[in-house]
Image (cartoon, rainbow, N blue to C red):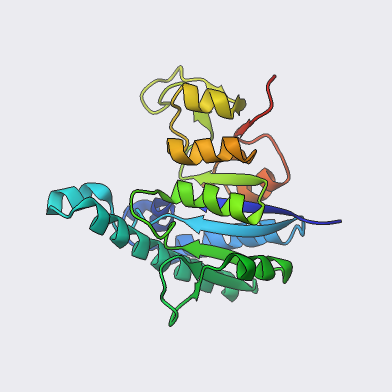
Amino acid sequence: MSKKRVMIKISGEALAGNDGLGISPKVVKEIAQEIKAAYDLGLCEIGVIVGGGNIFRGKLASEMGIERSSADYMGMIGTILNALALQNSLEAVGVQTRVMTSLNIPEVAEPYIRRKALSHFEKDRIVIFGGGTGNPYFSTDTTAALRAAELGATVIYMAKNGTDGVYDSDPRTNKDAKRYLKLTHKELLQNQLEVMDSTAAAMCRDNDIDIVVFDMNKPGNIKKAILGEPIGTVINNEEE
């Protein structure tokens, strides 16, 4: 049986834990264990995209007077730091892992080459993608959609930090907010629901890539998401 290929998108803030900034060794180890549990199912070839918000944020850049392109490159470097931290934690629990970056830093990671990434998947390695798309003005959400489309992944698992799906309004401010179990890509874009940026959402729609949004802070949820258990919101092109 051939394995499906999937991407797991993890925010940088999730790696910081309660501290908000920096990398929490305890949290990174816990995330590595969660990814390993999903990997050990043997159902998927897994790619991971990490954000960089725990290292450098746009708000901080504007306060410092840093222009957008420079701030975005600083954020991309932050994602590489996160990717290396996650790689080491995964390898500590016995999972073969490679970091590939869109910014060329050959001393610490491989440059992203599509055919090389496919070769790693075929050898049953987890591939962590750092450095965003390599271009400013694009988010790590767009990186996840781009790598999924390039590499033939069928689904992106959006592992959210404390959010258990997509709601019709902000559940933190509206106790009556309703969680969607299922949405279409069209509904996601039309209703401007804040799952991922519109560029990434449109790319997923155009390339028929499913999105599953779930809370990664509950132990076992990455594994449950890959098994198809109803733990969050599923977004695809299928009309009811």
Residue 154: % across, % down: 67, 46
Q: Is residue 145 above or below residue 110?
A: above
Q: Is residue 240 left or right of residue 98?
A: right
Residue 119: % across, % down: 68, 70
Residue for point 48% across, 22% down: 190
* Outermost residue, bottom side: 107
The residue nearer to you, when weighing 18 against 227, is: 227
Q: Quadrant of residue 155?
A: top right
Residue for point 48% across, 37% down: 163
Q: Is residue 143 left or right of residue 46?
A: left
Q: Is residue 121 above or below residue 133?
A: below
Q: How many marks?
A: 0
* Outermost residue, right side: 1
**Is any atom of residue 30 visible in this view?**
yes
The residue nearer to you, when weighing 8 against 17, is: 8
Q: Is residue 112 above or below residue 106?
A: above
**Is any atom of residue 55 visible in this view?**
no
Quadrant of the image for the N terminus?
bottom right
Q: Is residue 120 left or right of residue 74?
A: right
Q: Is residue 179 above or below residue 153?
A: above
Residue for point 69% across, 54% down: 5
The residue nearer to you, when weighing 177 against 10, is: 10
Residue for point 53% across, 60% down: 30
Residue 94: % across, % down: 65, 74
Residue 100: % across, % down: 52, 69
Quadrant of the image for the C terminus?
top right
